Amino acid sequence: MKKGTEKPKVIEDTFSFADAMQGVKPIEQDKIVPNKKVALEKKKQMAGVKHLKGSKQVAASFSFSDMYQAVLPQDGPMRYCREGVPTHVLKQLRRGDYSPEFLLDLHGMTREMAKTEIASLIYAARKASVDCVSIMHGFGQGVLKNALPHYLIQHPHVNAFHQAPLEYGGQAALLVLLDVPTPEYKR
């Protein structure tokens, strides 16, 4: 071996952490303790906002089943009248006596998207005390046209629907009559 290439010998002494920390001064804590009441109040407010958003979404949502197949008329225009609702309502819908205040266009939507939009439309219409809405399903391949009546029959707030008159979409749309709650001041 050449000189200078020798490795220094390591002296193994007993080395303890306590010996290494001798003479070290502890750091003084300068942290400000948060006010627990303020933090708790903020937490409650945030939970209330989240709950409010969630409750609106839950209220507007409705679970339509793709498995449910109602018995619908095979001849004539698409129509339905819930039990307990006078059948002359269908005639009024057909003639256009009811004019829709809300319109929903389902063109280009999938079944799942359409179900969400229909539930939201019904929720918004009832909230605004609107009793008649129009849902345009279009012609296309007939997927939404065939599924829409089965979805509407499932919803508890749909009283009746009828193929729309020409001015509201004709064979490519349905006029839907909703059960609207009576405002408190009219009771």
Image (cartoon, rainbow, N blue to C red):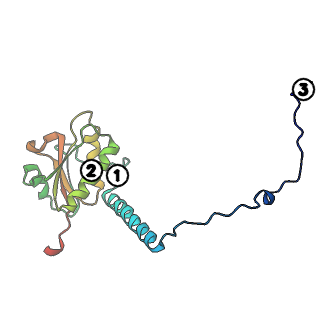
Precedes in sequence: disc 3 or disc 2: 3
Give the distance between the C-alpha atoms of the residues marked 3 and 1, in whole angstroms: 88 Å
36 vs 98: above or below? below
**Residue 185 versus residue 150 in the image, above or below:** below
Identify which amino acid the numbered label 1 is placed on: Phe
Q: Position of residue 136 (x, y in %)?
A: 19, 43
Marks 1 and 2: CB-CB under 8 Å? yes
Above or below for 100 versus 172: below
Q: Earlier in the sequence, mark 1 or mark 2?
A: 1
User: Which label lies toward us, 1 or 2?
Assistant: 2
Which circle marks residue 76 in the picture?
Answer: none
In what element is the residue under mark 3? loop
Front-most of residues 73 and 164: 164
Residue 44 in percent (x, y) is at 41, 69
Is residue 70 in view?
A: no
The mark found on residue 64 in the picture is 1
User: Badge 1, how many Cα within 10 Å: few under 14, some, many 20+?
Assistant: some
The circle drawn on residue 118 is 2
**From the image, which quarter does the C terminus lie in?**
bottom left
In the structure shown, which secondary structural element does the residue marked by tag 1 occupy? Answer: loop
